[in-house]
Image (tube, rainbow, N blue to C red):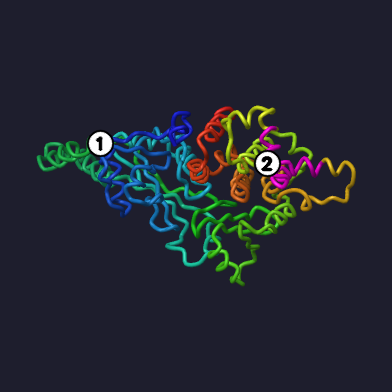
Amino acid sequence: MEKLIEANLYRSQLITVNGKLVERYNTCLQTLGFKQTQLSSFSIDGLGWSPEIAEERQNMHYLNNGDANPHAILITPRQKDIPVYMPFHSFDKEMMNFVFETYESQIKDITRDHAICVDFDQDIDTFYEPLDILKYQEISIGFRVTNNIVFHQKEQRDLINVFRQGHNFIDESTQSKLLESAKNYGDLRHRDFIMSAIAFDVESFYSKAFGGVYVLRDFISPILVFADKENYNEAIKDVVHDVLIYHINQPELVTKLRDHMILECDLRKEVKTERYNRIKKFELYQRLDDVEHSYLEILDEKVLFKSYLNKLSIEDRKKVMCVERYLEKLETSNTYKIADLVDESMYFALHKPHSSLTNAQKDLIWKLLVNISAKDILYLFWYDKSKFHDAFVTWKPTFKDWAVQTISNNI
């Protein structure tokens, strides 16, 4: 990952946690029912997730009490607007934005000396079967301030009310209690600790539960797309819910998404785009073994690209150039079909969200597309960083250079 780190493309906006903040973070972990970390310094993202603690626990989603009960930890107002690097749901970042929009002043006040545990409650104690994912409708976002400070604030305010009544201001017992409260917790009279639960509506989304599932329900009829074959096989046994269920590798899925005006693909337009060029270059890279030049040179210089293209077998050349060959042949005859000449995975990779979708819907569909066919390294980086990182470590060094340059030039 060194190349990504050097280019500020790998978790570059994490916040360092040390000193007193570690104590507050550990208090939150205990409050949520987790063990404290033994680390004296680590980093966190906008959700309060730490890559170092995840490695310590050998659990990338250590802030979850099961798939149905995720949490967040807030220890600094600096968590506002920074990325969520390991989301469990596609809407996690949107939820955190909503939290800060609603309670930014309270978060600033509370995190001066305390921390906030955030509970994402969708009234599901645990998942039992794949279609339980349909229960996601409205999430109640609840908050718990550490050290029971809300109770101590009420206690201090009650003591002040007693102090002001009659001649209680000269009562040594009342004075002692007030002084002890102020000594332990500071002056809480004007602190703003109240954060009532807020509701967050869920429409279409992706969740890592059940091995990864997309829930598309803003369209003609609800569609569930499973990434895990075993959970897909379990889901299709359901006869109660009126939903369409697909595995992500089923070719019929793309057809259905086009029929529902969720996807679209005009090859004549797509072949003129930079996205097509990136996909074509990735196709060439996958078919090259022994090269005398760096992949950065081969993929960015037209002469070298053509040179190495012509070194491939006829079949491999046809696959790299399949879209352009198909469009050329259409000029002479309309009897050709896409399936006759265009590689299926390349055709799927050139689809895009339908123009009628909202921006939020498009983001979700892009994430689905890069998992159906992961051939555009830029969109893979944008919409599924975990999968991008997994692929990146397998690439050859100079192709990594090309990937880093391509991404850096587009952000």
Q: Which residues are magenta?
A: 307-327
Q: Is residue 298 visible?
A: yes
- Of the numbered discs in the image, which one, if any, rests on residue 312? 2
User: Where's residue 375, x and y in %?
Assistant: 62, 43
Q: Secondary structure at mark 1?
A: helix
Nearer to us: label 1 or label 2: 2
- 26 lies above or below 183: below
316 drawn magenta:
yes
User: Where's residue 77, x and y in %?
Assistant: 39, 34
Q: Is residue 350 left or right of residue 80?
A: right
User: Where's residue 244, x and y in %?
Assistant: 65, 62
Dominant secondary structure of the residues highlighted in magenta in the image? helix
Which quadrant is the N terminus positioned in? top left
Q: Secondary structure at mark 2?
A: loop
Distance, label 1 to label 2, CA atoms, is 60 Å
Q: Of 361 and 295, which appears nearest the observer?
A: 295
Residue annotated with mark 1: 20
User: Where's residue 290, x and y in %?
Assistant: 58, 38
Kind of residue at badge 2: Leu
Crowd around label 1: few <14 · some 14–19 · many ≥20 (10 Å): few
- 328 lies above or below 227: above
Kind of residue at badge 1: Lys
